[in-house]
Image (tube, helix red, strand yellow):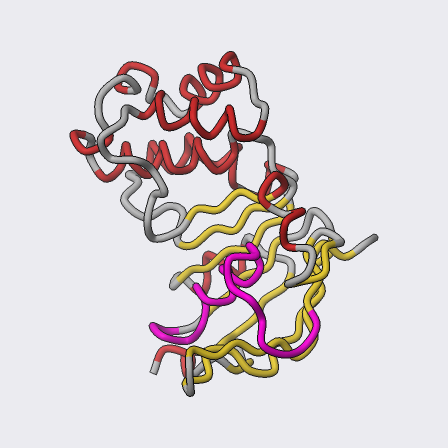
Amino acid sequence: MDAAIELERVERRYGERVALAGVSVSVPEGATLAVLGGNGAGKTTLLRVLAGLLRPHGGRAHVLGAALPDERWKLPARIGYVGHEPLLYRELSGRENLRYHADLHGVTHARIQAVLDELDVADRADEPVRDLSKGLVQRLAIARAILHEPALLLLDEPRANLDPSAAELVEPLIGRSSGRTRVLVSHDVAGALEESDVALGLRGGRPAPVDAELYR
């Protein structure tokens, strides 16, 4: 099976501060990588490197066959990203946000309606995002991430703000059963390990054993 992600001693710095150092991992196509660690461990930085949003300063990185950073232009159409920020325009409605994203990727508007229906947000989709609850905004953020049928999902606490029924709704779209390659950042060690095939612990931006020490 081909690797969807290949990292070899990847580094990333912010000025003098080292955010990632010596990070190596291989993730097969269709597998899930759990990235675990406490606050400031480098988890979100790693996701942004994988998305092509941050340039690695050292090491070797290939994502979906694209060498980073030189071929990062190949990635936006093939990656879905759910981060701490919903990446939605607050003054626009959910439907308008999804139309904008669909037009960028050549997705039909019929697909928008189908995704809104799957996530049970169609009846609120024409209201401004600023007027919606955090849970509804999170569902729209997930809708945006999967709208263009990406091969790779980068998920930073994707079930945040979702009640159990909403979490069940999103499962076929972003869970293991979606069949997509996934990188899952979570503070829930047991839950993340249960739904992953590969695990990477980070502490201070460096690889670390996956245990309770990560969170101290």
Q: Name the residue: 41% across, 26% down.
A: 98
Where is residue 106? Give x, y as percent: 59, 24
Residue 2 falls in image quadrant: bottom right
Residue 180 falls in image quadrant: top right
**Total labels drawn:** 0
- Establish if 196 lies above or below 139: below
Side (left or right) of 1 relative to 203: right
Region in magenta: 38-60
Q: Residue furthest bottom?
A: 16
Residue 116 falls in image quadrant: top left
Q: Specify whether residue 17 is painted magenta.
A: no
- Establish if 9 lies above or below 71: below
Where is residue 13? Give x, y as percent: 48, 79
Q: Specify whether residue 42 is painted magenta.
A: yes
Side (left or right) of 128 relative to 109: left
Q: Name the residue: 42% across, 37% down.
A: 142
Q: Name the residue: 40% across, 47% down.
A: 158
Side (left or right) of 7 relative to 109: right
Side (left or right) of 183 relative to 18: right
Seen from the viewer's position, the closer of residues 50 and 118 is 50
Q: Name the residue: 24% across, 30% down.
A: 129
- Establish if 143 lies above or below 120: below
